[in-house]
């Protein structure tokens, strides 16, 4: 990794902290550079995250700040709507919302390295329709940062969750004692699903 802790990763203050990492080693630096470009594009292609993550993934869709579905790549200020399918810790009929608050590319030519990162924060629905159920998962202290890094011939995809108050995110649906510690509550996805998504970014 270029750095042990990317600067977009929020400071851990309370709640759960989690890091998941996947990496591959390519044959040449040129191959790694090409894979990095592809991985960056997949990271921005939120509407197809389900396809990249494989079977059992939630439904992901990207919306603008007015709550309108859009088909382009992700931009800062957009929202991601997640339907957390097949996750007993979430109501499958209630979306999870996160807002994209930062997107950064960095180049380190002296290290033959580069990185691309997106930080999202749990959010309420971008257009309030008066239905409080739409806001039930909102834990706005929780952030997650997805980082694609290339160092030489190595390509990595990393997930960093900070300040995730899991009991606040799911406590209205399950008893606190039944909360599974391996649940990535920020998008209603499990560690296995998160790992598969990271693999899909850098495959």
Image: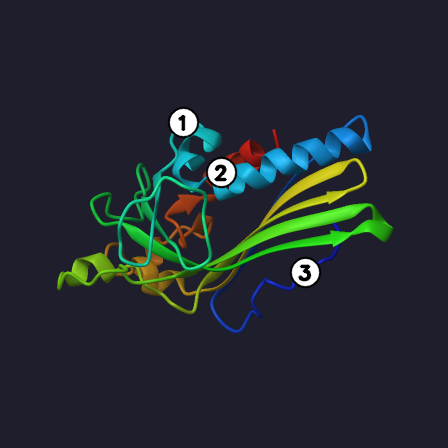
Horizontal arrangement in the rendering, residue 78 relative to residue 161 (left or right): left
Q: Residue at x 86, y 52 (%)?
A: 110
User: In front: 41, or 151?
Assistant: 41
Residue 3 placed where, x, y %? Answer: 74, 57
Q: Quadrant of the C terminus?
A: top right
Q: Is residue 202 above or below residue 113?
A: above
Q: Which mark is residue 55?
A: 1
| Mark 2 lies on residue | 192
Q: Which residue appears farthest toward the left when viewing the image?
A: 130
* 1 and 2 marks in contact (CB < 8 Å): no
Horizontal arrangement in the rendering, residue 182 relative to residue 108 (left or right): left
Sequence-earlier tag: 1 or 2:
1
Task: Describe the colour scheme in one phrase.
Answer: rainbow
Q: CA distance from mark 1 to mark 2?
A: 11 Å
| Mark 3 lies on residue | 5
Q: Quadrant of residue 54?
A: top left
């Amino acid at each position: 990794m270029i750095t042990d802790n990317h600067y977009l990763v929020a400071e851990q203050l309370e709640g759960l902290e989690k890091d998941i990492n996947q990496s591959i080693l390519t044959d040449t630096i040129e191959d790694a550079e090409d894979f990095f470009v592809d991985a960056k594009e997949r990271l921005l292609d939120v509407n197809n995250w389900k396809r990249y993550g494989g079977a059992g993934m939630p439904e992901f869709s990207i919306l603008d700040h007015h709550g309108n579905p859009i088909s382009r790549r992700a931009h800062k200020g957009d929202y991601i709507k997640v339907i957390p399918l097949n996750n007993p810790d979430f109501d499958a009929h209630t979306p999870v919302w996160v807002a994209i608050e930062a997107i950064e590319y960095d180049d380190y030519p002296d290290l033959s390295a580069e990185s691309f990162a997106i930080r999202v924060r749990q959010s309420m629905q971008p257009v309030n329709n008066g239905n409080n159920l739409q806001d039930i998962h909102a834990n706005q202290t929780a952030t997650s940062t997805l980082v694609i890094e290339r160092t030489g011939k190595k390509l990595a995809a990393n997930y960093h969750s900070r300040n995730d108050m899991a009991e606040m995110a799911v406590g209205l649906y399950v008893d606190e004692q039944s909360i599974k510690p391996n649940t990535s509550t920020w998008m209603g996805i499990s560690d296995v699903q998160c790992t598969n998504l990271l693999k899909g970014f850098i495959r």
